[in-house]
Amino acid sequence: MLTRDSLRGDYREIIGKSPQIFKVLQQIENLANTPLRVLISGKTGTGKEMVARALHENSDRSGPMVSINCAAISEQLCSDIGEFI
């Protein structure tokens, strides 16, 4: 059975013991050191930003993490930002 001790990363901010949480943590570990861009989607309050922060902090990505609330800006501006990322 998978436990937090078997994971390489630091996931203190993400709490829970369900199989679904461990699946998310495994996905973070699998994606952390790939050069791929990752889209995290979900309903409000589901922990998308925590997952993004865990992914960023457990990867080799350099620089600070910048969160953007695309719902608060126009669709055109959000799409323009996406071209630069």
Image (cartoon, rainbow, N blue to C red):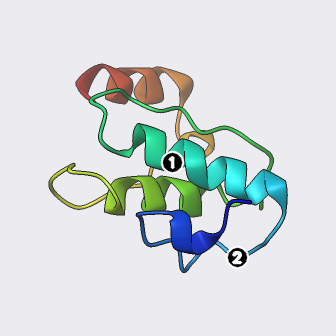
The quadrant the C terminus occupies is top left
- In front of the other: 68 or 39: 39
Question: In the image, is residue 62 above or below residue 74?
Answer: below
**Could you tell me residue 25's position as x and y percent?**
59, 55
On the picture, is 29 further left or further right than 84? right
Question: In the image, is residue 5 above or below residue 40?
Answer: below
**Residue at x 31% of width, y 33% of height:** 34
**Could you tell me residue 13's position as x and y percent?**
57, 77
**Residue at x 55% of width, y 24% of height:** 75
Label located before the other in sequence (2 or 1)? 2
Q: Which residue is mark 1?
A: 28
On the picture, is 50 further left or further right than 81? right
Mark 1 Cα shell of 10 Å, populated few (<14), some (14-19), many (≥20):
many
Give amino acid for label 2: Ile
Assign a secondary structure to mark 2.
loop
- In front of the other: 1 or 35: 1
The answer to which quarter of the image holds residue 21 is bottom right
The quadrant the N terminus occupies is bottom right
For the view shown, which residue lies furthest in the front direction? 1
- In front of the other: 19 or 48: 19
**Residue at x 57% of width, y 42% of height:** 27
